[in-house]
Image (cartoon, rainbow, N blue to C red):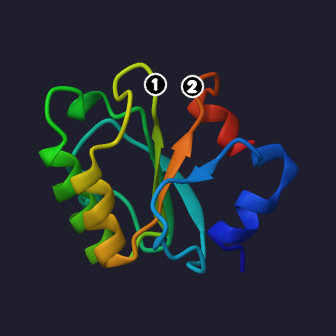
Amino acid sequence: MTTLKEILSVPQFKGLELINKNGDLSSEVTNLDITENNDIKNFTSENSFILTTGVLFQESQAGLKRLIKDLNDIHTAGLGIKVSRFLHEIDPEVIAYADELGFPLIEIPEGWNLGEIYT
């Protein structure tokens, strides 16, 4: 069993950072999914670590809260968000909501390609 905490401790993934202080890193990660759709809950499975650039939420992060709720409801391991090109920061309300749920939000550094996390 590999957890988000273990993934974040691997030197290869040193740049990944927990955004919200109450994100639970003990969830098992069984696979990774990359998405730019807000209906990923219909196409992923429990314990998936979901990665996104956040392009869908560049105009409004209200949808990001809905995505977090959906992913939490189906027991995914967490959400990795590339905070740079489309989202320069995560709104405090979104972070607070994820904290309420204990749902981990992981910042993916600007220079990283989402596919690098697969390797």
Bin the neighbour count of mark 2 within 10 Å (Cα to Cα): few under 14, some 14-19, many 20 and up: some
Q: Is residue 27 left or right of residue 2?
A: left
Residue drawn at x 23%, y 27% as measured from the top left: 58
Residue drawn at x 22%, y 67% as measured from the top left: 69
Residue 86 sits in which quadrant?
A: top left
Label 1 sits on a secondary structure element that is loop
Residue 84 numbered mark, or none? 1
| Residue 88 at x, y percent in the picture | 38, 27
3D distance between C-alphas at marks 1 and 2? 5 Å
The reply to whether callout 1 and callout 2 are in contact (CB within 8 Å) is yes
| Residue 66 at x, y percent in the picture | 16, 57
Residue 64 shows up from this direction: yes
Q: Is residue 11 left or right of residue 91?
A: right
Residue 94 sits in which quadrant?
A: bottom left
Instruction: Find disc 2 in the rendering and name its residue.
Output: 110
Sequence-first tag of 1 and 2: 1
| 26 vs 78: above or below | below
Label 2 sits on a secondary structure element that is loop
| Residue 73 at x, y percent in the picture | 26, 76
Bin the neighbour count of mark 1 within 10 Å (Cα to Cα): few under 14, some 14-19, many 20 and up: some
Residue 74 shows up from this direction: no
Residue drawn at x 79%, y 61% as measured from the top left: 9
| 19 vs 89: above or below | below
| 55 vs 33: above or below | above
Tell me the quarter of the image containing the C terminus. top right
Residue 53 sits in which quadrant?
A: top left
